[in-house]
Image (cartoon, rainbow, N blue to C red):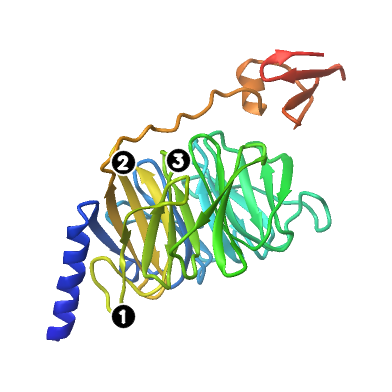
Amino acid sequence: MIAAFLFLLFSSLLLAQTNEVTYERTIELDNQIGSIEQATNFSTDNIYNFYLLDNNNNKVVVLNQDGNLIRMIPEFANAEFYDDPAAVHLFSDGRIAVLDKALKKIVIVKNKGDLINSIGSESGEVSSFDNPIDMVIDPYDNFYILDAGKQQILKFNNSGLFRGAVGIVNPIALSTDLAQNIYLLFQIDDTYAVQVFDSELQLKTRIELKGLLEPTDIAANYYGEFYVVDPELGGAIKYNTKGEIIGSRIGLKSDSKGRGNFADASRIVCSYFDDKLDLVSIYDYEFNYIQVFKVKADYERNKIETPPLTFDVRYLKKQKLPFKDFYAKNNLYYIVTPDNTLEIYKDSSKIY
């Protein structure tokens, strides 16, 4: 008993001495109505509500920032929206997208729980999924699917239309930032790295990572930095774009529950708090809780700005341009008008 108390005290002192990481709260998932026994992934919205995938009951469980139940989706036991949910994210209008590994589809529901539709092609098509393991949604509601079977990242626009793919190797997880950069965490031999792609899936850079044992997830912030969670380390490491470690590790490896303690830290989400603080949430699979931390930067940071909306279906609708069909390739945008005339645009300028 004394040893456990000293360990917890020592853990707290280590966190306090960093002057960068502050423990905020713990969300115990065993305390929820019906209990969340196996959360495979989670996301947050802009008011810090949690959206958790309850894999045992095939539901999205929505909790407020204090861990109180808001709703379950679907609400009724006999409603079956998902089969093997792997990732959950929110569109800018509040709709919820769930990537389902078994169905090989993205299931889209309203925030209140009504099923809208699903997206996914028949097996064998270029836009179909083989073994989808992760998904992210960028600021303009394009979504990107990480497919470990096809060894690809597949892009779909906000209307669910396929927009291309890029080949990758040994993928682990995806993240995105305000500038529509896509961060791929992957393994190469016995080491780990991150590839950063632009929104057209063109490779921008590759970042070698140090200090990792067996990472499982990545979360980019609003400043070109990112966090990687590693269950073998018992927490998360923050990196800059050069792959340099920033500050102290978030969390400690432990066999006992407690502030900053993790036995199997498997998922991570980074939310914007202010120009100095990131709000970092880490889920522990074994302890079945989420711990929330504020991570303070002791240096000046320049917030990434979301690029202006140029050309996509939402741009066409906003500009009230009539179109029958639309697709993009090599930074050119092709519009088929209602009278079957082909028009070609680059950015917002018509060139043909």
Q: Does residue 316 appear left or right of residue 88 in this picture?
A: right
Q: Sequence order check: which comes first, mark 1 or mark 3?
A: 3
Q: Quadrant of the C terminus?
A: top right
Q: Sequence order check: which comes first, mark 1 or mark 2?
A: 1
Q: In which quarter of the image is the N terminus?
A: bottom left
* Residue 237, placed above or below residue 274: below
- Circles 1, 3 touching at the beta carbon (< 8 Å): no
Q: Is residue 113 visible?
A: yes
Q: Which of marks 3 and 2 is in front?
A: 3
Residue occupying image coordinates x 48% and y 36%: 178
- Circles 3, 2 touching at the beta carbon (< 8 Å): no
Residue ID for mark 3: 224
Q: Nearer the viewer, mark 1 or mark 3?
A: 3
Q: Which amino acid does label 1 sit on?
A: Asp
Q: How far apart are marks 3 and 2 (CA)?
A: 15 Å
Q: Residue furthest left?
A: 2
Q: Is residue 76 visible?
A: no
Q: Does residue 345 appear left or right of residue 75 in this picture?
A: right
Residue ID for mark 1: 255
Residue ID for mark 2: 273
Q: Sequence order check: which comes first, mark 3 or mark 2?
A: 3
Q: Position of residue 191 (x, y in %)?
A: 55, 65
Q: Nearer the viewer, residue 289 or 235?
A: 235
Q: What residue type is labelled 2?
A: Phe
